Image: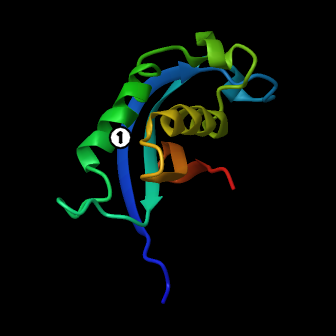
Amino acid sequence: MPEPVWSLRVGSDFSSSHQLRNYGGKCEDLHGHNFLVEVEVNGNRLEPDTGLLMDFKELKLKLEEILAELDHKHLNELEFFQNTNPSSENLARFIYQRLKTMLPDNKVSLAWVMVAEKHSSRAFYREI
C-alpha cells in the first residue's frame, strides 16, 4: 500500500525595491515589486488529536516573520543580498533556507518556495 502524503500551501506578499546587478537592462535601475510568495510543506503523519499535518496559521506566521525582514526594504542593502543578486530566484532560496530552520523537526518537510514579481512570472526553489 502506498504511503500517504499530505501537502499544505500558504501564501503571502511583500513590497520592496531592488536593482539587479549585471542584468544589462532596465532592471539594473532602482525599481520595486509587490512580490507574491507561496510555500508548500509535505508530511505523512497527521496529529492524532487534531487530524492536522500542521496548523495553517502556524505555517503562515513563520512565513510572515521572514517576509517582515524583506517588506518595504531595499533588498540590495540587506546582508544576504550584499553579494547575491536580489533576483526572484535568490529571494525564493533566501525564504526557503530561513523557513526550513523554523519548521518542526521530523514533522513536515519543506517542498518548495515560489516568488513572483507578477502573476505571469514565477521562480521556484527546492532542494532535492
Q: Which residue is mark 1?
A: 12
Instruction: Say above or below: 72 vs 109.
Output: above
Identified at 52% across, 34% down, the residue is 101
Rendering coords of residue 74 (x, y %): 54, 14
From the viewer's side, name the closer residue of 126 and 24. 126
Q: Is residue 127 left or right of residue 57?
A: right
Rendering coords of residue 9 (x, y %): 38, 55
Instruction: Say above or below: 59 vs 71.
Output: below
From the viewer's side, name the closer residue of 67 and 72. 67
Q: Splitting the image into 4 quarters, where does residue 52 fall?
A: bottom left
Q: Is residue 62 left or right of residue 30?
A: left
Query: For the C terminus, which image quadrant?
Result: bottom right
Residue at the left extreme of this rendering: 49
Instruction: Say above or below: 50 vs 125.
Output: below
Rendering coords of residue 32 (x, y %): 51, 24
Rendering coords of residue 127 (x, y %): 66, 50
